[in-house]
Image (cartoon, grey):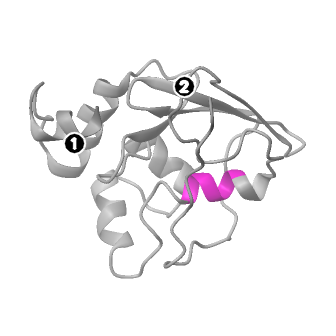
Amino acid sequence: MSRRIIKARTYFPISSEPFEIPLPLKMELHHANTLLCIYTVKTDLTVDYSYNANTDIPMPTPPEKYLTISDFYYILRSRVFQEDPFIAPVELKRLGLTEYNPYEIILKTYGIMPSDAYWLKRSDDSSGFDDAIAKYNKIMFGVQPPGPGSEIEDFLQ
């Protein structure tokens, strides 16, 4: 089975500024209902990850790549809105946050993006994909997601 790799969009800059995360930290990357990989950040700031070899869903990082803490920061930052002086204050208020911290934003939004079905969660979070979508929609739009058979459900499959 060949593996495809997702290329990050390069037309907008993603800040490389550090932000606080609890250590050690274990997070899971999913695509809809499929677990793709588990990232483990240790107290010495090394990053290990294991990936699901039984899927052909594109991975955001090549399985053979050595990940650094900077790579992990990039993964988290790429799944949230950017720290824009016009947009960020509105979004932070909506999320009930006072500071821009991609990790804290992901805890609230699961890193869900309207353009794909990838999402992140802490490994100790028991939420499934439907739970994550419902929580995201409730926070971002004040509504519950459409049911099965909707255009969004069809897109995410």
Q: Is residue 41 magenta?
A: no
Q: Nearer the viewer, mark 1 or mark 2?
A: 2
Q: Which residue is mark 1?
A: 137
Taking the spot 62% from the left edge, 28% from the top edge, the residue there is 1
How far is the residue under mark 1 from the one under mark 2?
27 Å
Q: Which residue is mark 2?
A: 55
Q: Amino acid at mark 1?
A: Asn
Viewer-proximal residue among 24 and 48: 48
Q: Amino acid at mark 2?
A: Thr
Q: Which residues are magenta?
A: 72-77
For residue 82, side relative to residue 73 (left or right): left
For residue 134, which quarter of the picture?
A: top left
Viewer-proximal residue among 86 and 152: 152
Q: Main secondary structure of the magenta part?
A: helix
Q: Answer above or below: position of 134 versus 44.
A: above
Taking the spot 33% from the left edge, 81% from the top edge, the residue there is 86
Q: Is residue 75 magenta?
A: yes
Q: Residues within 10 Å of mark 2 (few under 14, many from 20)?
A: some
Taking the spot 29% from the left edge, 52% from the top edge, the residue there is 114
For residue 67, side relative to residue 74 (left or right): right
Q: Residues within 10 Å of mark 1 (few under 14, many from 20)?
A: some
* Viewport quadrant of the C terminus: top left
In the displayed orientation, state which residue is furthest to the right: 44
